[in-house]
Amino acid sequence: AQKITQTQPGMFVQEKEAVTLDCTYDTSDPSYGLFWYKQPSSGEMIFLIYQGSYDQQNATEGRYSLNFQKARKSANLVISASQLGDSAMYFCAMGLGQNFVFGPGTRLSVLP
Amino acid sequence: DTAVSQTPKYLVTQMGNDKSIKCEQNLGHDTMYWYKQDSKKFLKIMFSYNNKELIINETVPNRFSPKSPDKAHLNLHINSLELGDSAVYFCASSHPGTADTGELFFGEGSRLTVL
């Protein structure tokens, strides 16, 4: 069965520092996508970054990068130079076929 | 111009009532979804439709009935509402069969409160 694990219910980071949010996944399917979404307190789901299972290089989008370690089945999100506006829930998700499975989320708090 | 729009955004109702949430997407996607986010923020898929055809139907009470009149619309009707139905319901869409290559586009969510 497909499963996403995020072991950090909450994280704190000082403004301007980098932070890594952990995500591990479980699937036997060779073709899948890994996604990170941000949900601020206003409630909307914001797409951040995508990594395909066949991609050789780690994905990057501005201050976001995805540390993809296929053998370890991990897809950690790295946020560089944290900003106060980064305080939110962060969800890791896996896309397979026509289904997207989400992890339980990590609440990130950026401290001034 | 909102890509995935849901109405209403907030819904407060009494136990036992019936309510509907509407969803429309203008992205040209064939696949649409309903997700439920509970009070602990867990996001769980409820239904998925591809071009008006039901393809995913998770273990959801029969009181929940999705309806897709066309591929741009996916509505959710809930009968005999219960306290445990209180949650945020997200509509989403994606290109068909490409969950491994393309992201999910979410609506703003509809917060349902059952009293």
Image (cartoon, helix red, strand yellow):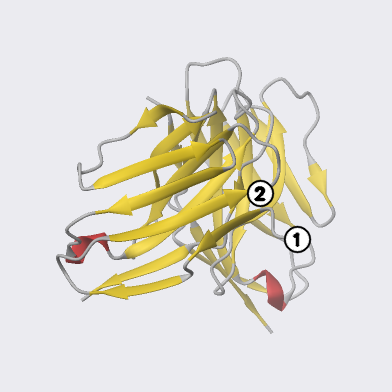
Residue B1 position in % (x across, y down): 75, 60
**Residue B40 position within the rendered picture, expressed as x and y whole percent measured from the top left:** 35, 62
Is residue A92 visible in the rendered image? The answer is: yes
- What quarter of the picture does the C terminus of chain B occupy? bottom left
Apparent side of residue B110 relative to residue A55 in the rendered image (left or right) = left
Vertical side of B93 occupied by A43: above or below: below
Residue furthest right as drawn: A62
Q: Secondary structure at mark 2?
A: strand
Residue B10, disc:
none
Query: A78 above or below A5?
Result: below
Q: Nearer the viewer, residue B106 or A39?
A: B106
The residue nearer to you, when weighing B113 against A7, is B113
**Which residue has dot 2 on it?**
A77
Q: Residue furthest front?
A: B69
User: The residue marked by circle 2 belongs to what chain?
Assistant: A
Quarter occupied by residue A49: top right
Q: What amino acid is at disc 1?
A: Asp
Q: Which numbered circle lies on residue B1?
A: 1
Label 1 – label 2 distance at C-alpha: 30 Å
Name the front one of labels 1 and 2.
Answer: 1
Disc 1, SS: loop
Residue B100: x and y in percent read 62, 27
Residue at position x 52%, y 16% in the image: A29
The quadrant holding residue A12 is bottom right
> Residue farthest to the bottom?
A112
Residue A79 pos. (x, y %) = 72, 58
Judged left or right of residue A102, residue B1 is right
Tell me if mark 1 has few (under 14), some (14-19) or many (20+) residues whose alpha carbon lies within 10 angstroms of its own: few
**In the image, what residue type sits under mark 2?**
Leu
Q: Residue at x 62, y 72 (%)?
A: A87
How would you rate the neighbour count of disc 2 (Cα within 10 Å): few for under 14, some for 14-19, many for 20 or more? many
